[in-house]
Image (spheres, rainbow, N blue to C red):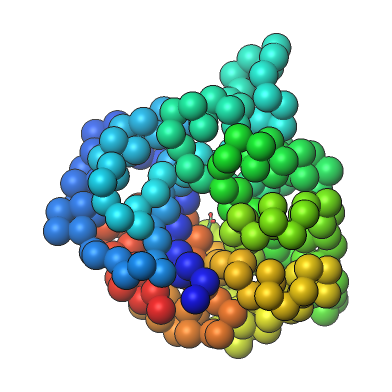
Amino acid sequence: MRKQIAAANWKMNLTHPEMVQLMDQLLDNAPSLNAEQEVVLAVPFLYLEAVRQRLQGMSGYRVAAQNCHHKTSGAFTGEVSAPMLASMGIPDCVIGHSERREYQAESDALLAQKVDRCLEAGIRPIFCCGEALSVRETGTQNAFVAEQIRAGLFHLSPEALSGIVIAYEPIWAIGTGKTASSAQAQEMHEAIRGVLAEQYGAHVAGQIPILYGGSVKGSNAAELFGGADVDGGLVGGASLNATEFRQIIAALK
Ligand code: PEP
């Protein structure tokens, strides 16, 4: 069975005391996971080490960076590289979140390089894709997302592709309270798996966890995760509340 993953994206939230409090609440009698389930916490760079230490020895719990640079090192003031993350024991990194695509003008070509830097360093990329409302309104969302997948990932070998996680996050559902229906999520996830299968075959495509993101909450997670191709969620706002996020973990297949 593919991994089923509840991934938190804290974004640029939480002061240090707030982070400590959230971790205390989350890890007090922490939900136990079965062998196929994972919890990933994508946290600001500053908190990676503290969170990594707190999760040490907890089976299935992983820490992730929210971004990394597309070069391995050099004169890039303020940036953090994939080899740096790897050297600090960080196993996962979110790549291509729509907020970075939009506010930092990250292109598909740049994201393909970031994916490469992660894989070279032994870091698992959580590769984000998803369409804006204007795209969905024209009914071209499947082609749009397929192109993001092709441009960001299709240079990879089947072995390399097998090591990634995809997060489908329709931009119109991120932080808006508007969730895709479970049917819309399943339809897109099936389409993404189909695109992967065309290029890499059904076996490889069947191994890739595809997470849904966009206003996932404790109250809607079980329904969203019910789709056959929905392997959990990437969660922003609700991951900042321990009760909500624990409900989301409990909704994993
Ligand atoms: C996200 O930032 O990845 C996200 C899905 O945010 P939210 O859950 O708040 O919509």
Outermost residue to the top: 75
Q: Residue at x 56, y 85 (%)?
A: 228
Q: Is residue 215 visible?
A: no
Residue 69 in sight: yes
The one nearer the camera, 214 or 126, is 126
Is residue 122 rendered to the left or right of residue 115? left
User: Which image quadrant is residue 129 in?
Assistant: bottom right
The vertical placement of 95 against 79, above or below, is below
Report the residue at 59% width, 80% height from top. Answer: 229
Image vertical order of residue 67 relative to residue 178, above or below: above
Where residue 166 appears, x then y in whole percent? Answer: 63, 61
Point 64% across, 75% down: residue = 206
Q: In this orientation, which residue lies closer to the viewer: 237 or 226?
A: 226
- Examine the image and state in which quarter residue 55 appears: top left
Task: Work out whether 45 lies above or below 135.
Answer: above
| Residue 32 % position (x, y) | 24, 65
Q: Quadrant of the C terminus?
A: bottom left
Residue at the left extreme of this rendering: 29
In the picture, residue 122 is in which quadrant?
top right
User: Which residue corresponds to the image point at 68% horizontal and 81% vertical from the top-left?
Assistant: 190
Depth check: give the residue in front, 217 or 168: 168
**In the image, residue 241 lies at what x, y percent?**
30, 56
